Image (tube, helix red, strand yellow):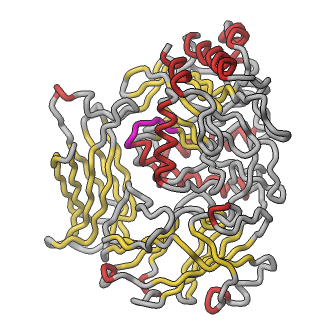
Amino acid sequence: MTTTMPSIPRPEFPRPDLERSIWMNLNGEWEFEFDDEESGERALWYSHEDFSRKILVPFCYQSKASGINDQAVHTVVWYRRAFDLPDGFRNRRTILKFGAVDYEAKVWINGKYIGLHRGGNTSFSFDITPFVKKTGNVIAVRALDREDPAQPRGKQSWRQGERFGCWYTPTTGIWQTVWLEAVGSVSIDHFRATGDIDRKSLLVEASLDGWEQGIELVAEVSLKGKPFKRVSVSVSDSSPVLTVDLGWPDELDGSCFWTPESPNLFDLELSVRKGGRELDRVKSYFGIRKIATRNGLFLLNNVPYFEKLILDQGYWPDSLLTPPSDEALVEDIKRTKEFGFNGARKHQKIEDPRYYYWADRLGLLVWGEMPAAYSFTASAIGKTTAEWQEFINRDYNHPSIVTWVPLNESWGVWNILSDKRMQAYSKALYALTKAIDGTRLVSSNDGWEQVESDICAIHDYGASGEKFLKKIADKKRYLETFSDWRLIYADGSSYSDEPIILTEYGGIAFKNIKPGEWGYRETVSNQDEFVARFASMTRATMDSGMFSGACYTQLTDVQQEVNGLMTADRKPKVDPALIKKVWEA
């Protein structure tokens, strides 16, 4: 049973990798207030205040889509709305979930404080069962978002909201879906599904909320709509593990694997049962694929694979970081593939989970990247590390994600070239990431000044393929020196046969740009010049034999940065077929 209000934004279930049948979407019109004096909590706004404004959740107040469209800095904002519990929630626990709230969220239900979450990019939830009633419930949210460079903020400006360089309008408060789920006395909080193509198996590691004697965890696997395997295990604690022997016939080897060209997925349902009674059930899916490296090559399913990536920042003109609709996510991925790319580097953004879902379904490699903090302090390290772990754990099950990027271009670790503490931080993030997820690659400081990493990731915005080929002709010397602006490796680190990927290049803009807008290097006058320059660098990278992939900057224009293959409102500047032809030449 799904309960939604009519015509609310983003009505689809927000976590299709962890889907329940009984839920209620809380997007739509909420009461809203700025709290510039930061007095609302002392004045008990969470219990009795009627707010003077309305906002359309899940859009931030800085966006047109929110109905407010105010780009001034307001450090504290409040939200309030009433709701009734649907009949399907009766005799079940009620879980309140938030897709993302930037940056710190405090939550009250019916005047009672529920809890706090810090981190502007990741999901969180609260069990509100003791605090809700059947009708007349009120939820209040206080969001605090300071212009603090220690906060992981990615491309959000921290200078009074001013857009500058490659930093854009900030996002404050609720910016992803808010919803309720009904669960049983014991429920599946989260799980990890790890497919193994070599052993033809699936490892399921579940984390249960609650525990009772005599319960079992059941996994049901289907392939193309047909039941495939069913495995159950008795549960002795809150972290049960089971293995599913997939054991498909030898003649199907490879045809069940997940790739961008053939994004095969198995359906998976997990349930918690006791004495024949079902306590909880979630629907999900998984892909069988393997990411590895060998002799300087990137391997997908044990086969060398060239990554044709697009840098994608995930901004929209009217809704900023929030995708305006599920269809908008689908169209971005379809456009990416029409241009000939097989993957995307989601740059400085932890994306809406439905983006990763559609990448799984439609077939697109994705690099998951942590939004940067811009200071190096104990506070910045703690905030980044905590949110980074939440990101990896939330999105572990998406087969489309193949690489994690904890740091980019030494942002926030400005002196990593020689600073041993900053180098230790990068190494620690690498080791932490590999400890949490040993199935994917890690690009530890993407672009330059790299320390321990699975990939030699280089940013180079040269405009000429011919000059680039001369530059890289002496591979050893090139890797010991500079990319575009900085040394490729930090002091004490050097190349050790990792795959080399040009993870940023291009950034071509047309001449008819406005003052304050920019691209990389000189502009071009027309489509022919654009394609020629794109082909020059792209073919040099592909034909050199040195690289395992390349990432073009970028999919769309973003505010003052107008170097996209499409405008900000997704109109192609260049015929996608011409770009695709370059990749396929």
Q: Residue 86, percent across and down?
A: 36, 81
> 256 above or below 135?
above
Q: Residue 252, percent across and down?
A: 19, 29
> 99 above or below 417?
below
Instruction: Judge whether residue 274 can be spotted in this image.
Output: yes
Nearest the camera: 479 or 528? 528
Image side of residue 571 versus residue 62, left or right: left
Q: Residue 488, percent across and down?
A: 71, 25
Q: Residue at x 29, y 54 (%)?
A: 241
Would you identify the image quadrant in which residue 556 lies? top right
Q: Residue 552, percent across and down?
A: 62, 28
Total numbered circles: 0
Instruction: Please state the extent of the stretch shown in magenta in the rendering.
Output: 361-366
> 91 above or below 558?
below
Nearest the camera: 265 or 64? 64
> 392 above or below 117?
above
Nearest the camera: 469 or 442? 469
Q: Is residue 364 magenta?
A: yes
Q: Residue at x 63, y 32 (%)?
A: 573
Image side of residue 222 versus residue 411, left or right: left
Q: Residue at x 66, y 89 (%)?
A: 49
Farthest residue, direction right: 515
Would you identify the image quadrant in which residue 416 lies? top right
Can you say which quadrant of the picture contains the N terminus? Answer: bottom left
Instruction: Judge whether residue 430 can be spotted in this image.
Output: no
Q: Residue at x 60, y 57 (%)?
A: 121
